[in-house]
Image: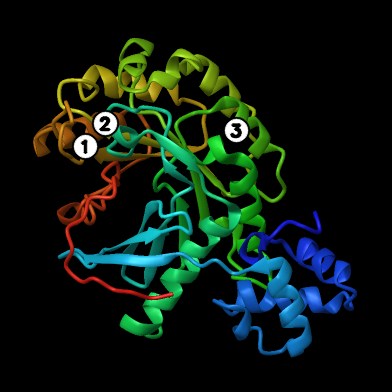
Amino acid sequence: MSASETVDLRSLTLEEATELVSELGQERYRGEQVFRWVHGWGAGSMDDLANLPAALRQRLSERAEIATLKVAELQTSADGTRKMRLTTGDGRSIESVLIPDGDKLTQCISSQVGCALDCQFCATATLGLARNLSAGEIVDQVYRAKQLLSRVEPGRRITNIVYMGMGEPLHNFAHVSKSLRILTHELGANLSFRRITVSTVGLVHGIEKLAKQDPRPNLAISLNATTDEVRDRIMPINKRYPIATLLDCLRRYPLEPRRRLTFEYVLLAGQNDTVADADRLARLLRGFRCKVNIIPFNPHPGAPYRRPEPSAVQTFQNRARSRGLPTYLRAPRGDDIAAACGQLANQSRTTLPVVMA
């Protein structure tokens, strides 16, 4: 860690926080205190590090910062889904979504500002890629959500995390991997890897790196087509990693007992929603320990696709199930505030503006 470098305490693992305080001539246990205050208790400023001596807080402020995201806008859907538009220190905007489901509360978090992979059905792709998020900016989405919940729904806690927001997580592998270590640390948010899912469009090199992590989060693959011809068109990454190459990689992916791969399949009317597609999907995934989430397309401005009729969605699911494929229909959540799958594009539809650190 360079002595002239200003570091973000949100981006530091326990080991890095310990290294930093050691460089400042402090006992190593002070690193644990810093980590616990930032990641366990959500400190938003140096003044919040109340268990540290004032002199150490001053020294830390000369080398480090806690640059929290700002909640610029909050939108609430008729179904209870909440979408936060967050701004970074350099003025970029990202979105994160809280999705309630009974006692379960899932947070969908972003890994990049925009996305470079140009999936034709995804609103985020229209933004292009501005930059990767740091590990601190990724984990701070969780901390801002916790702070929000403490104000609007005390007692409610986040039970699951999905890296399915803006960006391709495996395109930002180093920071995503680091954020996973931070969020699952027992002195931090202490989330279970079993309750975290990383979703990818199928970056084979990233999947291979994730396979070497131990422990690993759940893995979801955005498949969305059963032929290379269609997938090339709707997901250009398929030209680099065709379906056969992707599936061969996934066959080698290590799964713990009772864990499954998740395949996501966005249904696009007239593109990938036929009975023949359902038959091919079942054949392609035969032998995989998996489930398939069927997601009827969520429209957004300028999109060239339509959502299939409910009867077509049901026919597709019934056919896939009849071929032995475990499928689950994912009803749109938050689509009235552009918070549903594939709709995140920093659209402002203010219903409740908020300003919070």
Task: Say which amino acid is labelled 3.
Answer: Ile
Residue 207: mark: 3
Location of the N terminus by quadrant is: bottom right
- Residue 349 % position (x, y): 17, 58
Q: Reading the chain from its start, which is encountered first: label 2 or label 3?
A: 2
Residue 297: mark: 1
Residue at horizontal 70 percent and vertical 44 percent from the top: 213
- In the displayed structure, does residue 22 sit left or right of residue 72? right
Element at label 1 = loop
Say which quarter of the image contains residue 353.
bottom left
Characterize the local packing of mark 2: few (<14), some (14-19) or many (20 or more) Cα atoms within 10 angstroms.
Answer: many
Element at label 2 = loop
Q: Reading the chain from its start, which is encountered first: label 3 or label 1?
A: 3
Distance between mark 2 and mark 3 Cα atoms: 22 Å
Distance between mark 1 and mark 2 Cα atoms: 8 Å
Say which quarter of the image contains residue 83.
bottom left
- Work out whether residue 145 or residue 258 is closer to the camera in this orientation and state it: 145
Q: Which residue is mark 2?
A: 121
Task: Say which amino acid is labelled 2.
Answer: Phe
- Residue 62 higher or lower than 138, as above or below: below
- In the displayed structure, does residue 104 sit left or right of residue 74? right
Residue at horizontal 23 percent and vertical 34 percent from the top: 318
Q: Reading the chain from its start, which is encountered first: label 1 or label 2?
A: 2
- Work out whether residue 99 or residue 12 is closer to the camera in this orientation and state it: 12
Location of the C terminus by quadrant is: bottom left
- Residue 30 % position (x, y): 81, 79
Distance between mark 3 and mark 1 Cα atoms: 25 Å
- Residue 283 higher or lower than 212, as above or below: above
Task: Say which amino acid is labelled 1.
Answer: Phe
